[in-house]
Image (spheres, helix red, strand yellow):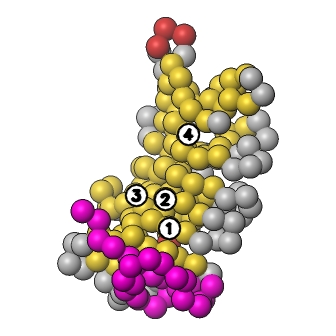
Amino acid sequence: MVGYSATAGNAAYHALLYSNGAMQDLGTLGGSYTRPAGINASGQVVGYAYTAGDATHAFLYSNGAMQDLGTLGGTYSAASGINASGQVVGNAYTAGDAAASHAFLYSNGVMTDLNTLIAANSGWTLQLAAAINDQGQIVGSGINAQSKIHAFLLTANTAPVPVPAAVWLFGSALAGFGLFGRRKAA
């Protein structure tokens, strides 16, 4: 189980891993705050942490060490999910646009903006990747050209993925990825 707790004197909040009856402080990326968001069966933990310069960066805690996953060129990133293979998803600001949140996939040491995997003229911006399953299917939310927020499912499988309710095709994708959305967010 993961969570976070105040350090002595409430000076900082650190992510913790609770296993076999003991809490383990996962440390920081040089700043005073870490917050976990997900864990896989191997005990790898993801979340976000302040750096020594007070920037917020996504982290992966694995094999006793916290790794800074970086950003998409901006000053912010946060991890929200991890699968059994250690693939991490979340959101990050892009270079030159400190307010534009983009969904990302971190895999094999590389953070990829998921918007680069869909057609550039699709009219969609994938803003948050919330979770990834062991088949590599990613769910999250995005915004269309009409400023409507929708859920999405991005998958390496080009066959349609059944989802409840109405399904709208967001746009074609590159590298064999299919992108499907459902229900508007309130």
Numbered tag placed on residue 93 in the rendering: 3
Numbered tag placed on residue 130 in the rendering: 2
Q: CA distance from mark 2 to mark 4?
A: 13 Å
Instruction: Tell me the quadrant of the picture where the C terminus can be found.
Output: bottom left
Q: Secondary structure at mark 3?
A: strand
- The stretch of residues the image draws in magenta is 157-186
Name which of mark 1 and mark 4 comes first in the sequence: 4
Q: Are marks 2 and 1 in contact (CB under 8 Å)?
A: yes
From the top left corner, tell me how far across and down residue 108 is, in percent.
71, 64
Q: In the image, is residue 17 above or below residue 80?
A: above
- Residue under label 4: 36
Amino acid at pointer 1: Val
Q: Secondary structure at mark 2?
A: strand
Amino acid at pointer 2: Ala
Q: Secondary structure at mark 4?
A: strand
Mark 3 or 2: the one toward you: 2
Q: Are marks 1 and 3 in contact (CB under 8 Å)?
A: no
- Residue under label 1: 139
Q: CA distance from mark 1 to mark 3?
A: 18 Å
Q: CA distance from mark 1 to mark 4?
A: 19 Å
